Amino acid sequence: MTTAAPPTRPLKVVHVVRQFWPSIGGLEDVVLNLSAVQRQTHGIDASVVTLDTAHQLPGQQLLRNDTTRGVPIRRMAWFGPKSYPIAPAVLGMLRGSDVVHVHCIDFFFDYLALTKCLHGRRLIVSTHGGFFHTQFARLLKLVFFNTVTRLSSKFYDSVVACSEADAQLFRRITRRNLVTIENGADIDKFRDSAAPTPQRVLVCFGRFASNKRIETLFPLLGELRRINPAWRLIIAGAEAGVSADALEAAALNAGVGPAVTISVRPSDAELRALIGQASYFICASSYEGFGIAAVEALSAGLVPILTSIPPFARLLCKAGLGMFYDPDDPATEARRIEEMASGNDGHLREEAMHAAASYGWEAVTASYVNLYHHLAARNRAWPRGRRART
């Protein structure tokens, strides 16, 4: 693919995502970093269209027009389930755009495909793991994926797989328009923040969601403390289907309550301070689209201890450090983790930070900008308001 010459005015890109700042999470971070770098470095007129409520902040009405890190935000009303929010008003927010960049496979993905003959915009979608993060209604999801998602994908100019695992998944339903651009991560936010000397402290940060299986960390911590009572666990993030109270109860039930610190919705500065107590990042997740938190952990200098799901397998292979573990065998894994910790003289901290360097946002953003210009050049070949040539 060759890079088309940019238009005389800034290229206008509208990012459409159901949840965004002030929500906290991997998806929100991706869209924020992508749109901010596009504006600051590449001269793209990038903005975000999202819902007017944050599921993590129930009862709080968000401003219809807002800004964060220089990125304009427009919010709209919606109804229906949180996993498939209905928001037809999105059509009125695409005016003047050259490219519409949809994030996730949800209502927006299907609705903008169905109405492409009306809005006439070039469409790309970033997959972000699809909707297979949990086993809930998996058979129904597979049927939907192979029918509705397959049909909607035909109206997209590009379907961008955010990981090799996503590429394998979406290759089943679309090949003509599928490209792979792996996600980046903000490797500056927590850079060099892990404990300066090795500590027997694990940290887990990200959403409190069922697929993260955070409750399985407590039996593991119990086994670790039987070997060495110095072990502690820090859990930080936003509630997303799993409450902090439930995690506290599970920790007490496992007999490790006093050794567990739980922080709900910490600021970046607060999370950085918590990371500063730890030397290891642990995640028991059963599914990830990419695993942004693990990359952020590497940048901090934390040694990753991860399940062997495909995104993590790729990350550990590329990083060349850390270990896989099985959450269902805490006694065996505790011995392995203690053995690794006993041999850690501090060199792993530097190796982790070095491994994170290749995940910076600049290269990822440049790939997307190249794709935008290519699509915008095609966009000028037909008048607005007529049916797009797909």
Image (cartoon, grey):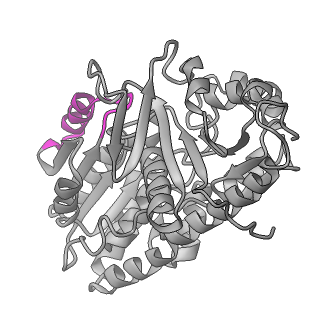
Query: x%, y% of residue 272?
Result: 21, 61
Above or below: residue 90 compared with residue 124: above
Q: Nearer the viewer, residue 283 or 200?
A: 283
Above or below: residue 217 compared with residue 335: above
Residue displayed at 72% across by 68% down? 5
The stretch of residues the image draws in magenta is: 238-257
Above or below: residue 291 compared with residue 216: below
Q: Is residue 117 left or right of residue 186?
A: right
Residue displayed at 34% across by 53% down? 69
Q: Nearer the viewer, residue 117 or 309?
A: 117
Query: x%, y% of residue 172?
Result: 84, 43
Q: Residue furthest front?
A: 8
Residue displayed at 76% across by 49% down? 158
Classify residue 149 by image quadrant.
top right
Indicate yes or no whether the magenta region holds residue 51.
Answer: no
Q: Is residue 73 left or right of residue 147?
A: left
Q: Nearer the viewer, residue 268 or 351?
A: 268
